[in-house]
Image: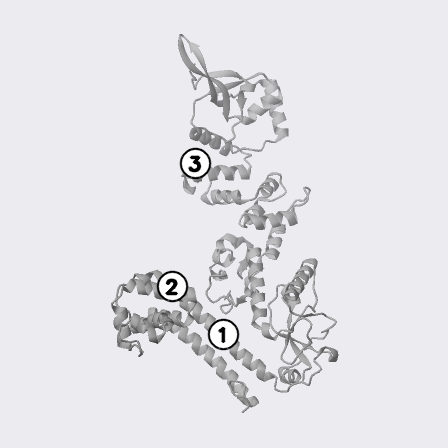
């Protein structure tokens, strides 16, 4: 039995089924009932289009032929549904044999020609065409729309299902949906949970814009920012934490995406990442003062830095964060002082502050309340009640221990920066692949790897004639330059990598890269300036750079 595309056949409704490929998923029940009433009065004026979906074999004129048994709707699902409401037995159909691609193309074309096309369904249709190789310009020409219109519609496909439903049922305005579609799925779910928990809510574009302005994080005053770039000292290699000035979640890096929000300062649209960076920065800041923080069970001593949860907290979320911080640092062994223990903040000028610190009247504080509010964090000062200070006499020169500790911290921080810069500059694979004699500085490293591990009394096992005497530099050079250079360079790289030999790594990096040499020299120079300044202050107090009394 043939399926002539120009022939209209009356096919039983129970043999016909909607296509799962059809982009159209929503049908207005009232409009379907109105269409059904029209069909009841006038009949179906336009047949639907179907294609065979299942076949069975039949003997025809002595030949076995395949005959359609069931059909799939290509065009006219709305008419089919209206006829089903009338409980008609048959429906006029144009039967065509079509491939999946041909059928999908016909479905999309029919849907795009509708006047009442749902924005989400239109977005899905555009997206399907785009995935099948059509450009935005091609889709725009085919649908009679502008390229901007097509791009905006396609953006809606990134909406999560609850927001798609809210848009379709009128809870969410189309302009607001465009804004929300730019967020990741986690952020969209947060919006839905916070703002659309009631089916009767009708939101406006302004409502959504206000929420986004509140929900987005202002990068210019983020705790972990220095001006508009990520603070380098707590993330020197830029790998553990992605820099905001290079991040896709920074609105400043794609201004056109959020241009309609009219915000000049860059914002972060990824709250999870923003909060993680903030918490990591807080941990780093507290770790810088770890050796001076008052421990659990101890009273305040001269030179201490204390943690306190004193301070005003606004809402339940901040109160919960403050409680979390208090428990977290308490479990780490730190003592967290309460508002009752340290009630009064110190606001006096710097001249009297130094004297009050020396006299033990004031203590340096890290205030967890600021951290709970996601504020910038710095050293604050609070008065020490008499019963909270140590009973031992206050050492008027305790500032010396503070300065020595700061000097050690500067040196340690500089070494971290230097190591990170050296690792960034050293290209292991390129270094190993170099086929040339070892340079003097490479020979020094090889000598440290090999000969420092072999007692000098056994060196003749490597270099004959050196049992009772040290090998000369010339003998060492000759020994290594007779070996495979690539193997030795691999040994050097592996030794540095496994043993974490920072001096060797820095030596390699500074010889490999002039830029790294300049950067490392600058880091050292800045550290020396800070240490020289500290040593000057020590000298003023009558102590040398090692803390010995002059």
Q: Position of residue 44 (x, y in %)?
A: 55, 19
In terms of image quadrants, where is residue 432? Answer: bottom left
- Nearer to us in this view, 84 or 280: 280
- Nearer to us in this view, 468 or 54: 468
- Vertical side of 367 occupied by 119: above or below: above
Residue wearing tag 1: 412
Q: Position of residue 106 (x, y in %)?
A: 46, 29
Element under label 3?
A: helix
Q: CA distance from mark 3 to mark 2?
A: 60 Å
Residue wearing tag 3: 142
Q: How many residues crowd mark 2 within 10 Å: few (<14), some (14–19), many (20+)?
A: few
Q: Earlier in the sequence, mark 3 or mark 2?
A: 3
Work out which quarter of the rendered image holds the C terminus and state it: bottom right
Q: Position of residue 188 (x, y in %)?
A: 58, 48
- Vertical side of 315 occupied by 155: above or below: above
- Nearer to us in this view, 8 or 459: 459
Q: Earlier in the sequence, mark 1 or mark 3?
A: 3
Mark 3 vs mark 2, foreground winner is 2
Tags 1 and 2 touching, CB below 8 Å:
no
Element under label 1?
A: helix
Mark 1 vs mark 3, foreground winner is 1
- Nearer to us in this view, 361 or 503: 503
- Vertical side of 87 occupied by 202: above or below: below
Mark number for residue 494? 2
Q: How many residues crowd mark 1 within 10 Å: few (<14), some (14–19), many (20+)?
A: few
Q: How many residues crowd mark 3 within 10 Å: few (<14), some (14–19), many (20+)?
A: few
Q: Position of residue 518 (x, y in %)?
A: 38, 73
Work out which quarter of the rendered image holds the N terminus and state it: top left
């Amino acid at each position: 039995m043939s399926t002539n595309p120009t022939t209209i056949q009356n096919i039983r409704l129970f043999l016909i089924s909607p296509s799962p490929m059809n982009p159209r998923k929503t049908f207005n029940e009232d409009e379907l009932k109105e269409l059904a009433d029209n069909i009841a009065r006038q009949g179906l004026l336009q047949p639907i289009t179907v294609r065979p979906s299942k076949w069975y074999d039949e003997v025809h004129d002595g030949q076995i032929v395949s005959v359609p048994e069931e059909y799939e709707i290509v065009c006219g699902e709305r008419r089919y549904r209206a006829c089903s409401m009338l409980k008609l037995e048959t429906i006029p159909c144009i039967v065509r044999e079509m491939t999946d691609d041909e059928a999908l193309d016909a479905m999309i074309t029919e849907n795009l020609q509708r006047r009442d096309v749902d924005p989400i369904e239109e977005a899905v249709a555009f997206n399907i065409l785009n995935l099948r190789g059509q450009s935005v310009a091609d889709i725009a020409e085919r649908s009679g729309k502008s390229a901007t219109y097509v791009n905006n519609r396609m953006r809606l496909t990134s909406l999560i299902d609850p927001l798609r439903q809210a848009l379709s049922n009128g809870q969410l305005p189309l302009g607001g949906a465009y804004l929300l579609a730019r967020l990741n799925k986690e952020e969209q779910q947060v919006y839905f949970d916070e703002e659309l928990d009631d089916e009767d809510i009708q939101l406006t574009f302004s409502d959504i814009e206000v929420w986004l302005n509140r929900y987005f994080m202002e990068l210019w005053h983020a705790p972990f920012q220095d001006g508009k770039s990520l603070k380098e000292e707590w993330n020197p290699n830029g790998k553990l934490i992605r820099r905001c000035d290079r991040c896709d979640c920074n609105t400043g890096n794609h201004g056109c995406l959020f241009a309609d929000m009219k915000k000049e300062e860059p914002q972060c649209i990824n709250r999870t990442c923003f909060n993680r960076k903030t918490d990591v920065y807080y941990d780093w800041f507290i770790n810088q003062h770890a050796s001076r923080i008052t421990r659990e069970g101890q009273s305040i001593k001269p030179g201490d830095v204390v943690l306190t949860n004193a301070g005003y907290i606004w809402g339940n979320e901040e109160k919960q964060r403050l409680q979390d911080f208090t428990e977290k640092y308490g479990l780490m062994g730190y003592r967290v002082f309460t508002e009752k223990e340290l009630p009064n903040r110190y606001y006096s000028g710097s001249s009297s502050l130094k004297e009050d610190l020396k006299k033990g009247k004031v203590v340096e504080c890290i205030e967890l309340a600021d951290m709970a509010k996601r504020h910038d964090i710095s050293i604050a000062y609070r008065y020490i009640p008499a019963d909270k200070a140590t009973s031992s006499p206050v050492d008027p020169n305790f500032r010396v221990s503070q300065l020595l500790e700061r000097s050690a911290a500067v040196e340690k921080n500089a070494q971290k920066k230097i190591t990170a810069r050296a690792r960034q500059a050293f290209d292991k694979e390129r270094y190993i692949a170099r086929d040339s004699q070892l340079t003097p500085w490479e020979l020094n490293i090889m000598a440290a790897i090999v000969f420092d591990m072999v007692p000098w009394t056994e060196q003749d096992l490597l270099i004959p004639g050196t049992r009772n005497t040290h090998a000369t530099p010339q003998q060492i050079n000759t020994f290594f330059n007779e070996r495979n250079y690539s193997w030795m360079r691999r040994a050097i790289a592996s030794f540095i990598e496994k043993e974490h030999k920072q001096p060797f790594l820095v030596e390699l990096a500074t010889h490999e890269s002039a830029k790294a040499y300049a950067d490392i020299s600058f880091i050292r120079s800045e550290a020396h300036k800070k240490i020289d300044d500290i040593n000057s202050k020590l000298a003023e107090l009558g102590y040398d750079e090692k803390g010995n009394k002059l």
